[in-house]
Image (cartoon, helix red, strand yellow):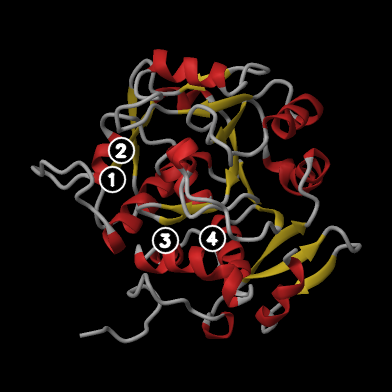
Amino acid sequence: MKQDIIPGINGDVYIPYTKRTGNESIVYFTRDLSAAGLIKAYDCISACLKGKVGIKLHTGEPHGPNIIPRPWVKKLYEKRLPEASIIETNTYYEGDRYTTEQHRQTLKTNGWTFCPVDIMDDEGTFNLPVNGGKWFDYMSVGNHLMNYDSMLTLTHFKGHTMGGFGGSNKNIGIGCADGRIGKKMIHTAQGSDDMWSIAMEELMERITESTKATIDHFGKNVAYINVMRNMSVSCDCEGVEAEPVVTPNVGILASLDILAIDQASVDIIYAMKKSERHALQERIETRHGLRQLSYMKELGMGCDRYILIDLDNGGARIYARDAAKNLKPFTK
């Protein structure tokens, strides 16, 4: 029997803005899908990034067609973050990023050669505490994460085969967990022969608890950018096998609140015409991916209400308390 529609339970049920409660955070928005737009968004949230900065980026499988364009990241690195490193971890599945040696070849293939790229689990792991979780007391991450003072979470927002959607939460929760221990903790039930045995709400909660461990570690020194471009229903981990893109490009969002930025990204999808959003909405709901959002709220990781600041129009507020329906003009 279908459960009641209650935020925090149904990962396949979208909660409209008017049904949400609590404070509002700030999310910045530009339609400018370019290196200049990326820098514009970054400048709004960069003040918190101190000391040694790690750029958490999904660098993609070989020749992946949908990843954030390398020239954009290069320009951001050169203009704003010349001392930073891209940070990644090896994959749980066997493939072209399974070992550090394979991963580095893939980085070379994809052109991530203009700045240091740190494979954080190359030399071991570190256990970060998970405060308030129901699945984990700690999460195993690449131990090089401890070498950084701040983290910029630079995310290609898209669908995901198991997570429904991949936003900042997935980028950190899966992307900072090390390839052998942490990712197994998230994906595999203890004693199971099926490495992908955890799914639906439980998977979303495990990903989110992993994320919480990392952002609690960085405290106020973490910022988030979601690039809503080439949004296949497939994750970038599917590389050239990703499903064709049928969702319109939107723009770039930036925030200091991880829940607000992922919620705003999802809201923008749901505000599209049915024909435009159908594929991605179906992917999100069939995987119960909306549980990522409600569980972040339960864990106190941010706000699901926000004010969207239009960077293209003098900082005008284009999304406030009851204005979800006005998201439609954002799409192209």
Q: Which residue is mark 3?
A: 292
Quarter residue 91 falls in = top left
Mark 1 secondary-structure assignment = helix
User: Could you tell me if residue 246 is visible in this image?
Assistant: yes
- 1 or 4: mark nearer the eye: 1
Disc on the earlier residue, 2 or 4: 2
* Image quarter hosting the N terminus: bottom left
Disc on the earlier residue, 1 or 3: 1
Q: Residue at x 65, y 18 (%)?
A: 115
Q: Are marks 2 and 1 in contact (CB under 8 Å)?
A: yes
Residue type at tag 3? Gln
Is 146 left, or right, of 129 in this rendering? right
| Residue 44 image position (x, y, % from top left) | 77, 49
Query: 141 and 180: which one is in front?
Result: 180
| Residue 204 image position (x, y, % from top left) | 35, 57
> Label for residue 259?
4
Mark 3 secondary-structure assignment = helix
From mark 2 to mark 1, how far is it between C-alphas?
5 Å
From mark 2 to mark 4, how far is it between C-alphas?
22 Å
Residue type at tag 2? Lys
Query: 54 and 23: which one is in front?
Result: 54
> Label for residue 186?
1
- 2 or 4: mark nearer the eye: 2
> Label for residue 183?
2
Residue type at tag 4? Leu
| Residue 171 image position (x, y, % from top left) | 49, 44
Residue type at tag 1? Ile
